[in-house]
Image: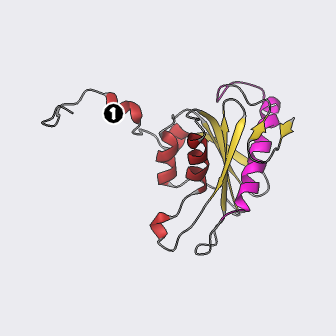
Amino acid sequence: MTDFRIGELRVDGADTEARNHSSEEENEVWIKPLIHQSQGAKEFAYCPYSKFRVGAALLAHDGTVFTGCNVENASYNLGLCAERTAIAKAVSGGYRSFKAIAIASDLEDQFISPCGGCRQFMREFGDHWSVFLSKPDGSYKEMTIEDLLPVSFGPEDLKKKRLFTTENGS
């Protein structure tokens, strides 16, 4: 059962580790509602320049869902993608670990895929969580952050031993 409360959305049955080996039927209990929420978020997109609507629904391990849409700006590089909007909402609410994100657009003939910047932004929070690329008809393709951004750079790389350090020891 899915609880579609406004404000703090939840998806029941989703409070497990990402990429668990549940049956496809069990996964449908939370994947389809998550995709539906990403499609709903797309409706709020502010995209007067590109006219390209994108929505995202980010699922935390406790079942809480954070939605986001793209928000464009006349100074193009200041726009926000839907994925980053959803993640920023979650992080500002104290969340740092995620199970999945679903992404929706109006593309009919292909699955929507996150841009390179969003891939790296998602990677900040791990590389083994699920990304559901969807179409308006609700069909989807499941990938992981690692699939989308192989051989990536993440927070753990900053902790590795380096050959060179600055004069102040950092």
In the rendered structure, does residue 43 fall within the stretch colored magenta?
yes
Between 15 and 103, the one lying in front of the other is: 15
Q: Amino acid at mark 1?
A: Leu
**Could one spot residue 20 in this view of the protein?**
yes
Please identify the quadrant where the N terminus is shown: top right
Residue 45: image location, x then y, percent:
67, 64
Residue 68: image location, x then y, percent:
65, 53
Range of magenta residues: 17-45
Give the main secondary structure, helix, strand or loop, of the magenta stretch: helix
- Total marks placed: 1
Location of residue 103 with respect to 91 vertically, above or below: below
Quarter where residue 13 is shown = top right
Residue extending furthest left? 167
Residue 104: image location, x then y, percent:
69, 55
Q: Residues within 10 Å of mark 1 (few under 14, many from 20)?
A: few
Residue at the spot 56% in from the left edge and 67% down from the top edge = 72
Please identify the quadrant where the C terminus is shown: top left
Label 1 element class: helix
Judge left or right: residue 135 versus residue 130.
right
Q: Check the image and tell me how it is coloured.
A: secondary structure
Residue 26: image location, x then y, percent:
81, 29
**Could one spot residue 139 in this view of the protein?**
no
Between 170 and 93, the one lying in front of the other is: 93
Residue at the spot 65% in from the left edge and 25% down from the top edge = 17
Residue extending furthest right? 1
In the rendered structure, does residue 36 fall within the stretch colored magenta?
yes
Judge left or right: residue 153 versus residue 64.
left
- The residue to which callout 1 is attached is 158
Quarter where residue 105 is shown = bottom right
